[in-house]
Image (spheres, rainbow, N blue to C red):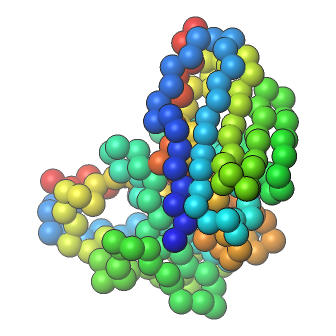
Amino acid sequence: QQNVQQSPESLIVPEGARTSLNCTFSDSASQYFWWYRQHSGKAPKALMSIFSNGEKEEGRFTIHLNKASLHFSLHIRDSQPSDSALYLCAVRTGGYKVVFGSGTRLLVSP
Amino acid sequence: GALVYQYPRRTICKSGTSMRMECQAVGFQATSVAWYRQSPQKTFELIALSTVNSAIKYEQNFTQEKFPISHPNLSFSSMTVLNAYLEDRGLYLCGARDGGNTEVFFGKGTRLTVV
């Protein structure tokens, strides 16, 4: 059974800082990996995804995936107050089932 | 674009009663629909996954007897919380995907309060 864990549970960083969020998974056959972001009172929305080992960058956001270590991460460069939200990592192992982590609550202080 | 609507947005029910929530996919075919619960502590739990032409699969700690789900077509799903108690409180999210798209699209959720 897939077990997805996130760390830290919450994080406060100053505006302009680099932020790192971590996610570990237990099923080595996992194939698809996402980060979702949920602003207060809103639906979770996919932020970025990665499907193969390595790194992917989109603007201020970078994902790293290391399947061998069962770990992937999200890095935010030049964090902004608007980045404050609940960040959820999600993993899919073949088929339709997507399992989410419990989330990291990020607060970027101005 | 792909949108998912959930209703009601908020509901209050008395302890021991039941309530039904609905999920509507617009702009894509909801081949699979997953129901999640986000607890007051923000834990994100998968309740069950419904895929067209397959049996609905419930996760550990969740049963069909407690959370019956209907997924009659590619645009609609509903879930009922039977005999609701305090521990059933939370935000219930519907996440839908089509067969060719790996992203899950979420509705804004139905917030259940049990009194």
Residue A67, x across and y down, in percent: 73, 56
Look at the image and tell me whether residue B25 can be seen: no
Quarter location, residue A62: top right
- The residue that appears at 53% across and 75% down in the rendered structure is B49
Q: Is residue A26 above or below residue B17?
A: above
Residue B104, x across and y down, in percent: 66, 60
Q: Is residue B91 above or below residue B88?
A: above
Quarter location, residue B86: bottom left
Towards the viewer: A64 or A38: A64
Compared across the picture, whether B105 is left or right of A67 comes to left
- The residue that appears at 43% across and 68% down in the rendered structure is B47
- Return the residue found at the far front: A68
Compared across the picture, whether B84 is left or right of B57 comes to left
Count how many numbered circles sit on residues in the image: 0
Residue B90, x across and y down, in percent: 34, 52
The quadrant of the rendering that contains the N terminus of chain B is bottom right
- The residue that appears at 69% across and 19% down in the rendered structure is A18
- The residue that appears at 55% across and 66% down in the rendered structure is A2
Residue B57, x across and y down, in percent: 49, 81
Towards the viewer: B30 or A72: A72
Look at the image and tell me whether residue B40 can be seen: yes
